[in-house]
Amino acid sequence: MISEKMKPFVQNNSAIRAMFEEGNKLRAKYGADKVFDFSLGNPNVPAPECVKEAIIDLVTNEDPVLLHGYMSNAGFEDVRESIAQSLNRRFGTKFAAKNLIMTVGAASGLNVILKTILNPGEEVIVFAPYFLEYGSYVRNYDGVLVEVTPDTTTFQPNLKEFEEKITAKTRAVIVNTPHNPTGVVYSEETIKSIAAIMEKKQKEFDNVIYLISDEPYRELVYDGAVVPYLTKYYDNTVVGYSYSKSLSLPGERIGYLVIPDEVDNSAEVIGAAAIANRINGSVNAPSLIQKVIGRCVDAEVDIAYYDRNRKTLYEGLTECGFTCVKPEGAFYLFVKSPVENEKEFCEAAKKYNILMVPGSSFACPGYVRLAYCVSYENIVNSMASFKELAKEYF
């Protein structure tokens, strides 16, 4: 018999994962080339060649006892130092190894920092639409998720409502830019406004409010878009990062937290986060892939591949009559449903073997998300099916 706390998680299992499993069934039935699965953000671009080279060299030449053994719960110091110096070069920061905790991807990193800072009953604010598992992560530690409703014109945060929803119980705010599911990049003006509001509220309530920046898509930007590095704008910022998207390594589960010296009582927070990494059950991030990251810290995936997919899908869908904000980053299109109930639209799309995720899975009904991290051929071949789907509505 499962626990009462687990029952709602089972009942509300991820629609994205359910759609992914449905895609597997359709591919088995019709063939992969006849199924257009835009459900899961699973990168189609291979990892950079240096990743394979590093794995081969490490496994061949390094001491296996050290390579596959335990290390500090925070991760290998040399790897953390390499990442810190890379961030310093790129963003003008002043991090050192001590400011980083290696984590089992960004999801684990978010759980680590929430376990570190969150007391039962305290609130964490998110901006809709958002990755719905943020709510699960917050409830893991008996916190309360507070949603700010979306501005569906720009999908920049609704700052007026944000300020109104900060209370004496607010412990953290989670932001995600470049954004899943919209592909929007929060402007520097937006970031400065968020920081100013949070500074004001910290003083008003005489309490630390953390800004948690979830950044798995930081390197995936287009048309010269610039993603502000948030630690420069607000002292109590913690950055969660993953190499799942930037190096096409989602199954390797590797990422990190940055906890700057400017964070209130930073040494205590860093020490507690390392312990949280252990007692959450991860113990430490995977050893081999940590060392790989240390060697490939400045590597990049082929952004041009995603950019071509972005343009082809966006232009194709708008020509069909669909409406969406052109994404500046990540690899998602957030398309307005032609009918109020977007789940009905998703069901209609299945007749043409098109799989999309309903916006209600991101607390934003009336929209659907398409992940364009698929093969270019899949996007091109899907256009005929989208045209048939469009005929039902336009």
Image: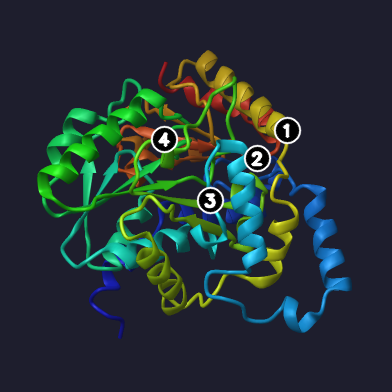
Q: Tell me which label, 4 or 2, sits earlier in the chain.
A: 4
User: Residue 342 lies in what quarter of the image?
Assistant: top left
Q: Earlier in the sequence, mark 1 or mark 4?
A: 4
State the CA–CA distance, disc 1 to disc 4: 22 Å
Residue for badge 3: 95
Residue 148 x %, y %: 22, 39
What residue did someone put label 4 on? 368
Q: Label 3: state its secondary structure.
A: loop
- Image quarter for residue 290? bottom right
Of residues 23 and 290, which is closer to you in this image?
Answer: 290
Q: Count of labels shown?
A: 4
Label 1 to label 3, Cα distance in Å?
42 Å
Image point (70%, 45%), residue name: 298
Is residue 156 in view? no
Q: CA distance from mark 4 to mark 2?
A: 17 Å
| Residue ID at (63%, 70%) | 286
**Mark 3 crowdedness (10 Å alpha carbons): few <14, some 14-19, many ≥20:** many
**How many residues crowd mark 4 within 10 Å: few (<14), some (14–19), many (20+)?**
many
Q: Which mark is residue 377?
A: 1
Q: Are marks 2 and 1 in contact (CB under 8 Å)?
A: no
- Residue 138: image quadrant is bottom left
Residue 374: numbered disc = 2
Question: Mark 3 against mark 2, which lies toward the viewer?
Answer: 3
